[in-house]
Amino acid sequence: MQTTTTGFTRRHVLASLPAMRAVCSLGWARERPGGQQNADSGEDQWFDRPMRWAQLTLVENDPGRFDLQEWLDYFKRVHADAACLSAGGCVAYYPTRIPLHHRSAWLEDQDPFGDLVAGCRKLGMIVVARTDPHAVHQEVHDTHPDWIAVDATGQKRRHWASPEMWVTCALGPYNFEFMTGVTREIVSLYRVDGVFSNRWSGSGMCYCRHCRENFRTYCGMDLPHTSNPHDPARRNYILWREQRLFELWSLWDAGIRKINPAASFIPNTGGGALSELDMKRAGEKAGMMVADRQARRGLMPPWANGKNAKEYRATLGRKPVVGIFSVGLVATFETSLYDEWGVRRPDFGLGDLFGARFAGRVEGPMQNSYLRIEKDSSSGLCHPVLKDLEDAGRIINGVYRVDATPLQKLPSVPLTLIPSYPDLPMEKVYPRVPRTEVPGVFLQEKGRGRVVYFPWDIDRTFWEVLCVDHGRLLRNAVDWASNEDRPVTVAGPGVLDVTVWKQQSSMTVHLVNLTNPMMMKGPFREFIPVGEQRVRVRLPAGKTASKVQLLVSGQKPGSRETGGYLEVLVPSILAHEVVAIDL
C-alpha cells in the first residue's frame, strides 16, 4: 500500500500505483458459476464480483479540504469497482448520533463519508465502510475510564504515536457495546456492503478490570505476566483471547446482517504476520480476506502483499483473496519442532514426512560451514535439486542447522555437511573434516507426493545474503517437489512478480515489474521499464488459444502454440502487464 501526500491530506490508497493495483486485483479475477450464496438469506453475496479495489483512508482534517470529485474521477480512471472508505471509530466522518463517537473537528455539517458512498454507488461500485476502534479521545477516557487498556503495571495506556489519545481495550465493553452501536449506525444509515475494521483485535495484552474478571471467570486464574508457553495461565490466555475475538467477530457480523443480509463483517487479519487467530476457523467464518502489508517499518518488499494473499489461499480455499498459490511441502530448519504453544517437541512433529529424527541439538551461529555436492554413486549424475550446481563442488551452508538423522537409509543424499571450522587467523581457515555422511537435505517420495526438508536455515540465509547458490537450490527443490511442468515460465531481463490464473474459458498471466533499486522497501520513486519477456504458458489439456492480447498496452502480441504450450512475446513492461488468453 502506497502512502501519498496531496495538499493537506495524507492517505493510504490501495490502488495508487499500477503495479500495486495489479497485485491487489489478482485475488478477484476468476469465475464462479452461480455466485456465492448468503447462507442465512439466500441472497447473492458480492465478494466474487470486484476485481480492483481502492482504499481511501481519510485524515481528520480532510472534511472540507479534500476534492471529492477528484477521487471519484480517480476511481473511475483506474477502473476500481470496489472501495473501502473511512467511516468511524476513532474519528467519525459522518454526522453520527452516538454519544462519545468523536466527529472530525472539521466535519461541521458535512458528510464526507456519505458523499463518497453516494459517488461510488453512481459508479456501480461495491462500498465497504472502514472503522478503527483502537484509540479514543480524552472525553471517552473521562467518561468511561474502564474502556481504556491497562498495562501490566496497572497504568492506563496513552497512545504511543498520538499521546493526546488513549488505547482501547479490544476485549471489553468498548468493542462489544460501543463499537457494536457504531457499526449498526453506519450500516443502517448507508447500507454498505460490509464493514472492514482495522486494529480491531487490540494492541497487546490488557489488564483492565474487565479483562481480569472475564479471564478469571474463564479459567479461575489471574492474567499472566509472562509469555512463557509453559505457564498454564499463558496458555489459557491465548485460548481465551482467541475465543473473545471470535465472539466479537460473530457479534458484529450478526448485527450487520440483521440490517443488510447481503453485508458482513471483514476483520483485518493480515498485518505484520498472518494472524494470531486460528486461520482454519477464520477461513471458515470469513467471506473474504485482505492482505495488509503497508511497509511501515523494517524490511517490507512490495511483493509481500501478494505473498500474504497466497498464504491465505491455504485456509480460504476458493474464497476471494489477493493472490493464489499451489501447495507443496518444502520445509526448512526447525519446522514442526515446536508445538502450537511455542514449546519445543522432543522430535519433529512431521518427522515421518521428512524422513528425519531430531538428534537433540541446534547448532549455530556457524562461522564457516559448507555443504558438499554429491553425485549418485551408480549413475555418476547429480540429483535434480542440484541443477546448475553440478560443478560447484561445495556451497556455503546456512547460519543455523538442526542436528537431524535419517529414520532409514536415504535413497539419495545430494548434499552432505562439511562441519564448521575457525574463521581466524587466516592460516587456520580450512575444513578439518573434508567429508561426512550427515545429510544437508532430506528427499522423500510419499505416494504421489514429494517432500524436501533442509535441516538448516536456507530460506532465512538466502533472504539475508542473497547467495545465488541458495536461490538455485530453493528453485530446484520447489520444481522437484511439484513434480510437474511449471504452469508458466517467463524469460527476460529484470525482476517480475508472476501469477497465472485459470478461468472456465480463459487464462491470464499477471506480470508486475519489480525491477527497481527500491524493490526491497516498497516506496518506488520511479518506474524502470524492462525489455522483452518471453512468456510460456501450459494450456489446459485439450484446449487451444483462440485469442491472445495484452490488456495494459492493448497490443496483440506475437505468439505461437506448440506441444500444449503457448509462447507469447511481451515487448516491454513499465509497471504491469496482463497476458489474456481466450481458450
Image: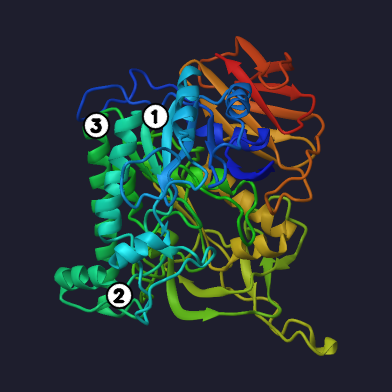
Which part of the image, by quadrant, shows the C terminus?
A: top right
Residue that numbered label 1 is attached to: 47
Q: In which quarter of the image is residue 572?
A: top right
Q: Which mark is residue 259?
A: 3
Pointer 2 residue? 234
Question: Residue 506, percent across and down?
Answer: 53, 18
Q: What residue type is labelled 3?
A: Ile
Q: Is residue 167 visible?
A: yes
Residue 130 occupies quadrant: top left
Q: Earlier in the sequence, mark 2 or mark 1?
A: 1
Please name the residue shown 37% across and 82% down the image: 153
Tell us which disc is closer to us: 3 or 1: 3
| Disc 2 from disc 3: Cα separation | 38 Å
> How packed is label 1: few (under 14 Cα within 10 Å), some, or many (20 or more)?
many
184 over 500 or under it: above or below: below
| Residue at the farthest top position | 546
Name the kind of residue labelled 2 in the image. Arg
